Image: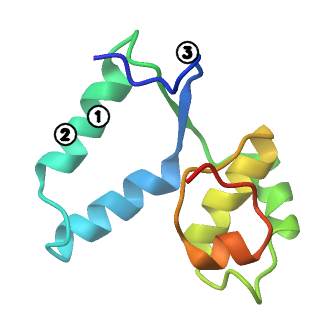
Amino acid sequence: MQATVQGGDLIHVPTICLVEIIYLIEKDKLPASALDRIYSYLDEADSGVDLVPLDRGVVEALSRVPRDLIPDMPDRIIAATALHLGLPLVSRDGDIRAAGIELVW
């Protein structure tokens, strides 16, 4: 299965999302298979899914994500990753939308 958006663009997954998936599995909000599924996409060379590390560029972009509007640190890291990459974020989070981060969904 090709996991790219229309036009063939890669789907970039911040590493913090993997941490969030584990957290949601532990809280029984997601099935354990969710982590295996994302791992299989990441391990498949032509899946169109790319893991984006939490690196200095993301850390520096964090200052552009207003803490008063997005108080949750994982959400701030996800938003900062999108800003760092210069890409819109796929999210329906109201706090992220209110902060003016470009959203696709």
Using the image as rendered, state which of residue 92 and residue 37 is in the foreground. 92
Type of amino acid at the residue the image marks with label 2 = Asp
Q: Which residue is mark 3?
A: 8
Q: Which residue is mark 1?
A: 39
Type of amino acid at the residue the image marks with label 3 = Gly
Numbered badge on residue 13: none
For marks 3 and 2, the one nearer the N-term is 3
Q: Position of residue 100 (x, y in %)?
A: 80, 68
Quadrant of the rendered structure where residue 64 is?
bottom right
Quadrant housing the C terminus: bottom right
Quadrant housing the N terminus: top left
**Element type where label 2 sits in the image:** helix
Alpha-carbon neighbours of circle 3 within 10 Å: few (<14), some, or many (≥20)?
few
**Element type where label 1 sits in the image:** helix
Q: Position of residue 21 (x, y in %)?
A: 32, 59
Alpha-carbon neighbours of circle 2 within 10 Å: few (<14), some, or many (≥20)?
few
